Image (cartoon, rainbow, N blue to C red):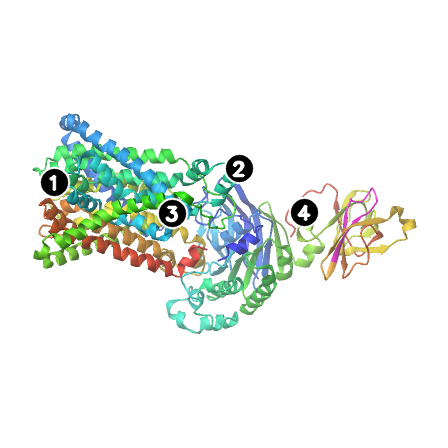
Amino acid sequence: MSTTAAGELGSAPQLLPPAGRPPAAGRRRPSPPVLLAGAVLVGLLLLLPLAFLILEAVQYGFSALRPLLFRSLTATLLWNTVSLTVVVTALCAVIGTVAAWFVERTELPGRRFWAVLVVVPVGIPDFVTSFGWKSIFPSLGGFGGATLVMTLAVYPLVYLPVAASLRNADPAQEEVARSLGLGRLRAFLRVTLPQIRVALLGGCLLVGLVMLAEYGAFEILGFRTFTTEIYTEFLSGFNAPAACALSLVLVVLSLFLLTGEGLARGRGRPSRTGALAARIPRPYRLGRSRLPVLAGFLALVGLALGVPVGAIVYWILHGGSSTLPSASIVSAAAHTVFYGIGAGLLATLAALPVAILSVRYPGRVSLILERSNYLVLAMPGLVIALALTYFTERYAAGFLYQSSTMLIVAYAIMFFPLALVAVRTSVAQAPASLEEVGRSLGRSRLEVLWRLTVPLAAPGLAAAFSLVFLEAVTELTATLVLIPTGAHTLATQFWSFQTNISYGQAAPYAGLMILIAAVPSYVLGRWFDRLPSRAIVSG
Amino acid sequence: MTWLEINDLHKAFGRSPVLAGVGLTVPTGSLTAILGSSGAGKTTLLRLIAGFERADRGTISLGGLMVDAPDSAWVASERRRIGYVPQEGSLFPHLTVAKNIGFGLPRAARGGGRIDELIELIGMQGLDGRYPHQLSGGQQQRVALARALATRPQLVLLDEPFSSLDPSLRAGVRADVKRLLRSAGATALLVTHDQDEALSLADRVAVIRDGRVCQLDTPQQLYDAPADTEVAGFVGEANLVPGVFLGRSVRTAFGDLACGCGARPERAGADAVVLIRPEQIKLCPVDPAAASRAGRIVDLEYHGHDSVVRVQPGREDAPSVILARVLGQVSYELGSPVELTVEGPVVAWRAEPVRSAAKP
């Protein structure tokens, strides 16, 4: 609201560190006890699965785990998992970046249309994409098949951050580079690429973590990785020591990935200098390359979106689904929505104290909480589910095992990092000075929290909820392990039908699941844009 | 009676000290301005008084109650009965004008007449349902003040409340704020880096420099009798001219000038630095034939109500440029020879002045 005024009065003194970044030293304001207690509770919850896993490993002892770790199977799985992860991540990086550049920076005909279509595949669960391909091309499988399917399913995870970063990057830098005699490609490599580097690395990290955690898609394609093997061990009489040993390797791999990304990113450098006046860059003309580029986009969207959606539609129409069990699909949808809402609420509620603590009262406690969050990122859903199962079976006499509470808690832990990102961003955007004003008006810290911080962070809270809801609705692996006996979600019903190759019966479940995941996110997206508080946050 | 009393206040961020022994008293019902350049510690002082930060050393008391004394007393921000108006207004973006103003009121009073009363006071009837982004900068600032006044605070803190406003709006909003504070009978403390604002608005001005208050006086005293050359330059334009003390007057290139009342007599013959305000300089035309020792106009700045003239005095014992302020139109041209004379008493300090500490 006052950026222009502040810009004119450039001489206005800046005596304090900017709001939101408290001084590095000096007397630190103590964090409110309620907030602290809540955050610590959340931190403990986040660390439970890892603690259980380590406890389990200690119980079996190294001598029992060693033969399970050092065998040729482990080497095969390691090779499969790592090589596929590397290849798919590289492909996604290229496809995502190139697509983002064409959409954001060129006169691609129908830019806004492509911008939506290119992202949509992220809403289709990977195991559904995989099902779509397999049901049309039954011979698909192995390394090649897995590479094709996974690349098409997850490249939007690179596209999204890179496109956002291109939109925020200062286009003048690229223009200056061009004016200094660099060609289009060299300007991209030397100026634009460094601008989007952090976003690209972040996207690649997401792809890598998904690859390590994915189960359903690989099972359908018959490609063996750690997750498929762990699940098999779990099913075949619950070979707990073997599952535990393989889980440990998987967690270590994820941690490697996380630290690797952290090291490669280095210290964040500002992507622009000088005034922040946003300017729409002049898009590049495509000229003669227009048709090939359009064909490329058509092929990408056709393969990533057309094939799975087409397959679902085909099987619904021709799959002999006249015997559609309508009661079962309604009950499965109700369960899915119920678990999704529960997980969304719990994860958002849990993220709030952690976000406020880390933004407003940075210190040792909030640092430990950040680390716990980091460790959760390294825990694939299957490993979290198995760790919780193991613990309840062993120490709590099966208490809560296969209860809806346990499933919702597992979802909330798995998707907590997503919720935290959304909530923390919006808490950080709400100026701390507003809270100070609130307190100077005689209102207590908790009241200010409730009447100012929470409403200001509302868009972030809603985003967190919808993200977690989306992920929970399309979650398969942990659900298969933890689903209450007798209950079904859309994902588990879909899975049991497709395992029996009843494609016609499986397809409606997949279709409904995608609809349930897509509709609320669309509605919420529209709703955010109209919130009055958007006006301030964007200044 | 004194409402706010600050003693020997220290505050450092990391290793860099920001406040280094601030002492300040604010009488009940007065409007005191804290004037200082960027980085002088003004805003930090305000935040300490508001209770957003804790002092490292020293004490703050409000209405006789100790609110911040390290290791003994601490009263949280919400219990200090202060009103705070931050730099950019900082209205709550998700609340309407009426709800912003009523934020600090107890729940039962939020529907009552207090909000209407304040909306009327700031002259914004009919706009109570607007959101902050639908208001102009001046309106936002008035709402921020009404919000601070709603709970009838004992002390209102204003942090550069006009700096984010358009210069053309500033004078009007300034006058409004002064009127509102007077009618509310509030004690107020205003932080600013604008000397014009401090002199025109406040009853008393505290000049803060290097984390210390170096002078606390009425605006007139501050302008006419600054504590040292730096304060002199900070609160207005200043010609600093060398001279020699002659008891209660000084001898300069512009003749023997009387020192203002209250000046301490200095030993005759001591070197002096003499402050001559631009409006004390009078220009007289000289015959070009007799102009060898006259000054010469090197620059003219026309401001409408007055003009600022830069003159090269043409004497070795005077500074190379003297600033003169002349009401209305100037009838001279660039290069015209002029004779300079000084009117009224001047201020003089011993040369190589030692920076004086706070003057009571």
Q: Are the residues tagged 3 and 2 within 8 Å (C-beta)? A: no
Tell me if residue A417 can be seen.
no
- Residue on which the image places disc 4: B230
- Res A180 label: 2
Q: Inspect the image, locate mark 4, and give the three-letter code of the amino acid beneath it.
A: Glu
| Residue stretch rendered in magenta on the structure | B307-322
* Quarter occupied by residue A533: bottom left
- Residue on which the image places disc 1: A394
SS of the residue at dot 1? helix
| Residue sitting nearer the eye, A230 or B353 | A230
The answer to which of marks 2 and 1 sits earlier in the sequence is 2
Labels 1, 4: one chain: no
Instruction: Characterize the local packing of mark 3: few (<14), some (14-19) or many (20 or more) Cα atoms within 10 angstroms.
Output: many
**Residue at x-position 18% and y-position 34%:** A142
The answer for how far apart the CA atoms under marks 3 and 4 are is 58 Å
The answer to which of marks 3 and 2 sits earlier in the sequence is 3
The answer for how far apart the CA atoms under marks 3 and 2 are is 25 Å
**Pointer 4 indicates a residue of which chain?**
B
Q: Are the residues tagged 2 and 4 within 8 Å (C-beta)? A: no
- Residue on which the image places disc 3: A103
Q: Inspect the image, locate mark 2, and give the three-letter code of the amino acid beneath it.
A: Leu
Q: Are the residues tagged 1 and 4 within 8 Å (C-beta)? A: no
The answer to which of marks 1 and 3 sits earlier in the sequence is 3
Labels 3, 2: one chain: yes
SS of the residue at dot 4? helix
